[in-house]
Image (cartoon, rainbow, N blue to C red):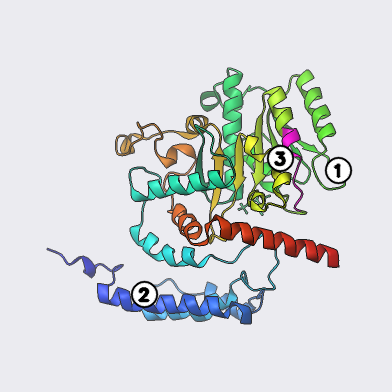
Amino acid sequence: MSDRFEHPQALRPDEFRRIGEQALDIAARHLEAVVERPIRPMPDASTRQTIMEQALPIQGHAPEDILSFLEHEIMPHARGNGHPGFMGWVISPPAHMAVLTELPGVAMDSPCGGSGQGATYVELTAIRWIKEMLGFDHPGSHGIFVSGGSMANLTALAGARHAAANKHGWNMRRDGMRNAPDFTVYTSRETHACVTKSMELMGMGHDAIRLIDTNDAYRMDINALTKTLEKDIEVGRVPFCIVASAGTVNTGAIDDLDAVADLCSQHDIWFHVDGAYGAFGALDPDKADAFAGMARADSIALDPHKWLSVPFDCGCVLVRDGQNLRDTFSLIPAYIRGTDSESSEIGSPHEYSFQLSRAFRALKVWSTLMHVGVDGFRDTVHRHNTMAASLAEDV
Ligand SMILES: Cc1ncc(COP(=O)(O)O)c(C=O)c1O
């Protein structure tokens, strides 16, 4: 019988442990030294050359050499998330328990498109926890981890269009956009670029987007939205979704979510909230009022890799009607039919988004939430908002 540790990609157990300890030390040194390094290093030409001009390894290198290259040539040029002075965008430092659970999680190497494995149940649990944190735990609701906010918004918009097509007797999956109803989306000028990219990718183009003006506080002007929407309905356009922001990327503006929810329910339109970085702002008791209406959404896009400090990458989409999302994406090829519990009530994760093979993203959300707890995040979010208010006052 062949020795399974003879394979080129394997390390013998004692070697795995020895090298693993070195890897752990490197990670610990990196996290300890974050404050001493530049916040935003700018790798010079010779650094770029060192990294980019390595020759294709025809023969493998020793594990120690690989780790040494990582520590000395690559890691010093990490962006300084976690440095107390790092205030760029909405990028957080990595939650330490998520860093530590990543190694055993990767050792599992779970193909998380399929169901019926430990990873599936962790994902369902982590999704339920997020729904509970945001008051979105509606019967029949569902959610899935994706690469980030962009993919979460795209996934939700595809679900919204599918629902609208069904309502209009249009078979979107069979007939696509050719001769389709004039589906149109509404969102503010401050919306994230990924909404536009999603519309391009869905074959709908910029003409199907109504960019609504904002008021002095950079929030979507509800009067302008109502007027544009009603005029469009009169001329035969088919509004399929209103995208409201729960924290715009430029200014942090939160649209009037309750007003948008009212308008959506009046016209039977899908209400989507882009809360990529902002949704967890609802945890701050002092700010919760601004998020009133978010739980009325048909879908929410949010990013654990932003305010929850889950290391990249990890986005999440929540939907009120899980079955609609499954109908939007489920396509089970013959070679995997019957291998999963796809005939079960919930089915497999790959039925709810574009991805088939998926990483075990849920693990880092689960371990972070297990460690920090909702109280820990409530304190963090409140502290950040207090610091932002104090900075604004100083400015
Ligand atoms: C409001 C908003 N939506 C969407 C995104 C895109 O998210 P991601 O970068 O995770 O794809 C961002 C990113 O900053 C954002 O702030």
Under mark 1, the amino acid is Asn
Using residue 253 as the reference point, say whether residue 183 is left or right of it.
left
Q: Position of residue 5 (x, y in %)?
A: 23, 69
| Front residue of this view, candidates 73 and 13 | 13
**Residue appearing at x 32%, y 79% in the figure:** 18
Q: Nearer the viewer, mark 1 or mark 2?
A: 1
Using residue 141 as the reference point, say whether residue 186 is left or right of it.
right
Q: Quadrant of the N terminus?
A: bottom left
Q: Earlier in the sequence, mark 3 or mark 2?
A: 2
Q: Mark 3 to mark 2: distance in Å?
A: 45 Å
Q: Residues within 10 Å of mark 1 (few under 14, many from 20)?
A: few
Q: Which residue is mark 3?
A: 244
**Res. 268 image quadrant:** top right
Q: Is mark 1 within 8 Å of ligand 1?
A: no
In the image, residue 375 sits, relative to residue 116, either above or below, namely: below
**Res. 294 image quadrant:** top right
Q: Give the residues drawn in magenta, as a range.
A: 252-260
The mark total stands at 3
Under mark 3, the amino acid is Ala
Q: Position of residue 196 (x, y in %)?
A: 69, 42
Residue 259 belongs to the span the image colors magenta = yes
In the image, residue 246 sits, relative to residue 173, either above or below, namely: below
**Residue appearing at x 74%, y 62% in the figure:** 386
Q: Residues within 10 Å of mark 2 (few under 14, many from 20)?
A: some
In the image, residue 217 sits, relative to residue 71, either above or below, namely: above
Decide if residue 226 is in sight here.
Answer: yes
Q: Which residue is mark 2?
A: 20
- Does dot 2 land on a helix, a strand or a loop? helix
As drawn, the label of residue 215 is: 1
